[in-house]
Image (cartoon, rainbow, N blue to C red):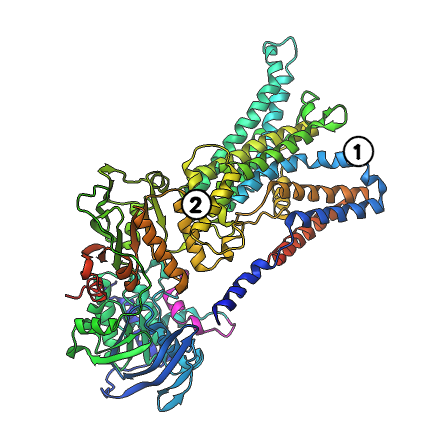
Amino acid sequence: MRDPSDSQTNERSGTSKLVPFPFSKGVTVLEQDIILQARSIYKGYPGVQALDNVDFELRQGEIQALVGQNGAGKSTFIEILAGSLSPDRGEIEIGGKVYNHFDPSISIELGIQTVHQENQLVEELSVAENIFLYDLPKTRFGFVNLPNCVETADALLKQLEIDIPSEKKLTELTFVERKLVSIAKAFSRKAKILILDEPTASLDRKGREILFDIIRKAADTGLSVIYISHHLGEIFEICDRVTIFKDGFKIDTSEVKKTEMTSIVQKMIGKSSSTLAVHKKANISAEDADTLEVVNYSRGDAVKGVSFSVRKGEIFGLGGLVGAGRTELARMIFGLDKKDSGKLIFCGKDITPVSPSDAIRKGLGYLTEDRKDDGLFLIRPIFENISTVLFTKVKSMFMDLKKEQENTAIVSEQLSIKTPSIAQFVINLSGGNQQKVVLAKWLHAESEILIFDEPTVGIDVGSKSEIYQLMDNLAREGKIIIVISSDTPELISTCDRVGIMRYGKLADILSGDQITEENVLRLSMGVE
Amino acid sequence: MNDKMTNILKKSPGNKKGINQSLLLIILIVFLCIIATVVNPRFMRISNIINIFQQVSVLGIIACGVGMLLVSGDIDISVGAQVSLLGIILAMIIEKLGGIAPGEANAWMVPYAVPLAIAASFGIGALLGLINGIIVIKSGVTSFIITLGFSTIYKGVALLISGGASYMLFGRFETLGRGRVFGVIPVAIFFFIGVVILSHVILKYTRYGRFLYALGGNKKAAFVSGINTKRVTLKAYVIVGLLNGLAALILISRVGSALATTGEPYSLDALAAIIVGGVILTGGKGSALNIFLGVLLIGLVGNALVIMNVNPYLRGIVIGIIIIAAVTISNASSGKK
């Protein structure tokens, strides 16, 4: 960031009259003015009630946190406010008017702006152009009036006390600067209500402080903020009130000053939902030598000195928030990504893989987080998907096609992949069956150590329980299994022990009765 | 929506059987043959059929190499320039060494001219492929752009070393391009068919072939599955280079002389044949048989237009229409958007 006394921004400050801004300093804000009131909002999807009789109110000038586990209904709610979803029932009162639903243009007109987790900015354009992209000022010949655009953008940034020269291209900006540009963009559209979805994701400590500073200043001038975050610590730093969603219900809204982290966590968990898993905790004897040792894996800030060991027949879970370094760790263990340090020891032997092919030869298998991205050959038949890993292990020039058909059919049957034929293209299978194909390819290659990264994302309930059953069977057969999951009940019901990662470190390892939703969440979020 | 319904919805695109690409190509070929025969019955003569095969053999050999590469999701549009460059080199060797008069000091070199030319064609062909492959892999830039650059470079080198002049073989190297087995079937056809069969075997029966499909299907997944993706890509480029070496030998032998632009049309013609043959630009799909049919179709168009006494300049227009039609039909029938 540049020095605030930089001359360029100051010189231009006098010409800000072109755009009337959403707030002006010195306006007295009535603390208790309710700017938005949602009443009895319902929204259902097949099989899921995403929002169930939700009430919500937002005061002028307040920063209100919205928290809840994955699937609690936060996203659905903010999409309704943004106008991209219509509620089934319920009403929203804003500025004295009552609406049954918004559409995006109404929502914008009412001053509701969302800053998404992923930047929705154009990399190749300047800051100024990004801010006014929706309505670029034009010259009388129809070209973009760039000087005017830069001038107004500079004035806006000045007013927000964001110190970024608006001629800069977006590619030259840091993460936090981009986030600030997104916020400035929201302001330029006369935001009265700003929805921030996980704004601190991928920001470091300093970036967070800069961001918080801007948000606080904006709130002081009368802007209302809905702040969505998994990091409870942040909520105590910046928010006035906190609203907790759970399974589509609004559980509570309370003043942050009058509440504690533990009570927020309690309310997020509530009564535990039904569990599908079947894994009977393994009966592991202490003298069992068949142990996989993960020793001191590190890379930069992503993963910091993670060590743990997994015994034969055990399912070891890795919990934590998205971005805590779990997938990064798995990819390093499998030899996919570079690492600063780390050793993998199996049965006393160093088997640290240097590449995926090396890892496969040493008996590892990795079911990646996003099966479509790097797990499957979607436009190839099932049997080819299953056999490919095995073919990388053998050295013969030709393939035995008949044996391939027979063997892959057997594996496919064992995992009960539902398909008319194993010649079917994988793209035509359901999510659950696709995941089974990924598992099949590692089992076919006789992998002994299996890493499941988010194994049941986007999978229906039936297939979920089938996958849990398979994981249990594999553990019983003596395979070593590591499961990465953001689905806490999944960790609780499938794992013998769960290691929780936070900011790249292994915070703690839970075992037996310690593995509760509360403990997992607390450790993930860093609640004392 | 209940589960059953979602299942039906999911299945419907799969159940909608796409027209088999081979069948589509055969229908097009038969259709074209019928029209040509009706206009001029001479089209169906054995001699003309053999003629067509001979005409497409160079294109076919090049297309097989690029086709296998494209199955893996990479492309090489410098093949035309490679063939030109290799042609110039081998013609220079034959003209310069083979043309030494009996009395001169280096006269002993004469019998080695053709073997040296053959070795150079394959060796340098493989080298060009290797260079292409290494730069594509190391740069991380789309292979289209890298090989576009190399296409210009190779053409430049060919012009530079030839000085823009043509090199003549003076009948010293005719068998490959003009020779006929039993006086009937041109030698070149055997090489063409041989390369098609070899490509078929590679793609269908070898691990390497399977890895090509895997790379084209999903390069990241291929890497996670333990395939050495860089080595597979590099080999594919070398195979392209080797086949270009063979193609250059046959082409120059048939034409009897080499210019810096002799191979130029083959870049786009090969690509056209492959695309018509059902290989998709992103890779992961395609077969040697269909590439063969694609090559045949492209060759037929040229021949049929001549036989029908139509303006041969129409060739480009007709091929263009066939490319667009073939790809549109197979795309629409496979239910993909």
To which chain does the residue with label 2 belong? B
Give above or below for A194 relative to B326.
below
Q: Which residues are magenta?
A: A121-142
Residue A522: say if magenta: no
**Residue A202 x/y as whole percent:** 28, 60
> At numbered mark 1, what does the secondary structure look like: helix, strand or loop?
helix
Q: Nearer the viewer, residue B101 or B63?
A: B63
Amino acid type at image mark 1: Ser
Q: Position of residue A525 (x, y in %)?
A: 21, 64
Reply above or below: A376 against A139. Answer: above
Q: Disc 1: which chain?
A: B
> Which quadrant would residue B169 be assigned to in this image?
top right
* Location of residue A391 (image quadrant): top left
- Report the residue at 28% width, 63% height from top: A488
Precedes in sequence: disc 2 or disc 1: 1
Tell me residue A400's x, y (percent).
51, 36
Is residue A5 something one can see in this rendering? no
Mark yes or no: residue A194 visible: yes
User: As drawn, is B323 to the left or to the right of A456?
Assistant: right
| Residue at the spot of label 2 | B222
Q: Looking at the figure, which quarter contains the N terminus of chain A?
A: bottom left
Q: Is residue A138 magenta?
A: yes
Kindly report the secondary structure that dominates the magenta region of the rendered protein: loop
